[in-house]
Image: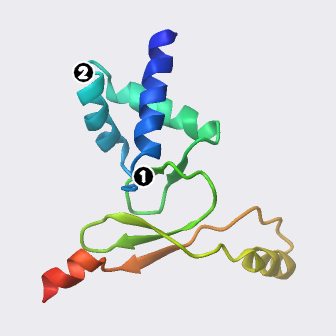
């Protein structure tokens, strides 16, 4: 049990310490530098557990690999259509949308997920 806890703590520290929104494979690659014998299955199990505990969030947008975010609070993202990197967008979440959709549909809306798409600064400058 101690070993799993050590692994979970290392995974949480890495995900919270990066702004790159890593995939499970990237987390596994980084964890192997610290814990050489950690398996990909262990990384997946711990990421799912950390998500369930509300310590991290998972960005699971259709047609893309899941990425993990050390910020578990609802916020917006930008995904570059060329390089695939994901960035946090410093913009307050518009909770009025949730209320408006709930009124229109009768659904009980808990939150919404918004992802902007386009080209990041690096990819824009490589076009020039």
Q: Nearer the viewer, mark 2 or mark 1?
A: 2
**Image quadrant containing the C terminus:** bottom left
Judging by the rendered image, the residue that carries numbered circle 2 is 36
Residue name at image x 56 percent, y 32 percent:
49
Is residue 30 toward the left or the right of residue 97 in the image?
left
Badge 1: residue crowd in 10 Å (few <14, some 14–19, many ≥20): many
Which quarter of the picture shows residue 117? Answer: bottom left
- The first of marks 2 and 1 along the sequence is 2
User: Is 105 situated above or below 25?
Assistant: below
x, y percent for residue 12? 48, 36
Instruction: Pick the residue in front: 94 or 113.
Output: 94
Q: How many marks?
A: 2
Instruction: Pick the residue in front: 33 or 86.
Output: 33
Which quarter of the picture shows residue 37? Answer: top left
Judging by the rendered image, the residue that carries numbered circle 1 is 67
Question: Is the C-beta separation of discs 2 and 1 under 8 Å?
Answer: no
**Disc 1 secondary structure class:** strand
Is residue 31 toward the left or the right of residue 114 in the image?
left
Outermost residue, bottom side: 128
């Amino acid at each position: 049990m101690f070993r799993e806890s050590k692994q979970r703590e290392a995974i949480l520290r890495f995900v919270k310490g990066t702004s790159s929104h890593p995939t499970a494979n990237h987390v596994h690659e980084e964890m192997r530098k610290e814990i050489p014998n950690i398996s990909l299955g262990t990384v997946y199990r711990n990421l799912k557990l950390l998500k369930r505990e509300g310590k991290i969030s998972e960005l699971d947008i259709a047609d893309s690999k899941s990425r993990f975010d050390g910020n578990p609070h609802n916020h917006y993202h930008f995904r570059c259509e060329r390089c695939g990197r994901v960035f946090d967008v410093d913009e307050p979440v518009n909770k009025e949308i949730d209320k408006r959709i709930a009124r229109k549909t009768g659904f009980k809306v808990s939150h919404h997920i918004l992802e902007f798409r386009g080209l990041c600064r690096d990819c824009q400058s490589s076009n020039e």
